[in-house]
């Protein structure tokens, strides 16, 4: 158990819908990261937050957005869902957010029908 | 951006055998981590090793930063070692955006 929690574990929805994925970092960690794992793209970095502020962006679509709240939990919002958005979404956390170990949560498996 | 190549892509072992997995990266890195993704999809952190050598039980890892490669050694393999092993690096000067390799898929047979 990494100490990072994600909910829900599984999510099944239809094209065009909007969903919210939630992540709670390890106790004491200030930085949260979101990654997407799909069959065709592999594991890709989406976005990083540090102590409530966006710090780095990767290959995140405009239909996706994220935020980190004052209690340091984070949410990833996916809207206008397409079949290709079906993937495993991971949240990770680290103490500082630069050159330190990232610990990954169990992931949320999203299926878009 | 930085490129990460892992080899071999697939590996089949008999229980008890040893193996070496390799990760090559194209630029200097601030962070290098090895992960094991088990058959249930969980990503388990094995090592944080931007340079040097570390050991944890039957697993050890070595990163030679000047030559831009890292090696993961698995000794006396067990069926529970099966899964995909990923190397991930960050070369952004402190933002910690991990770039993952394609992975090595390991199957250990009894």
Image (cartoon, rainbow, N blue to C red):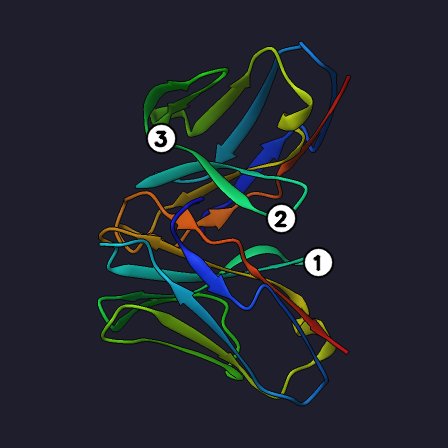
Mark 3 Cα-neighbour bin, 10 Å: few <14, some 14–19, many ≥20: many
Q: Where residue A62 sits in the image (x, y, percent)?
A: 50, 83
CB within 8 Å, label 1 to label 3? no
At a point 55% along the width and 26% down the height, the residue shown is B22
The chain identifier of the residue carrying mark 3 reads B
Left or right? Give the position of A73 relative to A82: left
Q: What residue is shown with label 2? A: B41
Would residue A61 appear left or right of A99 to someone viewing this image?
right
Sequence-earlier tag: 2 or 3? 2
Specify the subunit that label 2 lies on. B
Element carrying mark 2: loop
Q: Residue at x 34, y 41 (%)?
A: B31
Evaluate whether label 1 is on the same chain as label 2: no
Q: Residues within 10 Å of mark 2 (few under 14, many from 20)?
A: some
Q: Chain of mark 1?
A: A
* Element type where label 1 sits in the image: loop
Query: Which residue is labeled 3 in the image?
Result: B49
Pointer 1 residue: A40
> Number of numbered discs present?
3
Residue B23 numbered mark, or none: none
Q: Give the quarter of the figure containing the C terminus of chain A.
A: bottom right
Q: Residue at x 22, y 67 (%)?
A: A51
Q: Secondary structure at mark 3?
A: loop
């Amino acid at each position: 158990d990494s100490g990072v929690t994600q909910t829900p574990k599984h999510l099944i929805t239809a094209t065009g819908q909007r969903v919210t994925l939630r992540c709670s970092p390890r106790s004491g960690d200030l930085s949260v990261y979101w990654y997407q794992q799909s069959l065709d793209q592999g594991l890709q970095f989406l976005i990083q937050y540090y102590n409530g502020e966006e710090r780095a962006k990767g290959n995140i679509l405009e239909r996706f957005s994220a935020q980190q709240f004052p209690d340091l939990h984070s949410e990833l919002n996916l809207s206008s869902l397409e079949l290709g958005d079906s993937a495993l979404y991971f949240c990770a956390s680290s103490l500082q957010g630069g050159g330190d170990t990232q610990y990954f949560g169990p992931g949320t498996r999203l299926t878009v029908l | 951006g930085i490129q990460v190549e892992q080899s071999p892509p697939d590996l089949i072992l008999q229980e008890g055998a040893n193996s070496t997995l390799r990760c090559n990266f194209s630029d200097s890195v601030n962070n290098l981590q090895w992960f094991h993704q088990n058959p249930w999809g969980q990503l388990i952190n094995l090592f944080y090793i931007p340079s040097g050598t570390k050991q944890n039980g039957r697993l050890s890892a070595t990163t030679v930063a000047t030559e831009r490669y890292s090696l993961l050694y698995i000794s006396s393999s067990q069926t529970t070692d099966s899964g995909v092993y990923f190397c991930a690096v960050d070369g952004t000067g402190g933002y910690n955006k991990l770039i993952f390799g394609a992975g090595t898929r390991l199957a250990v047979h009894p």
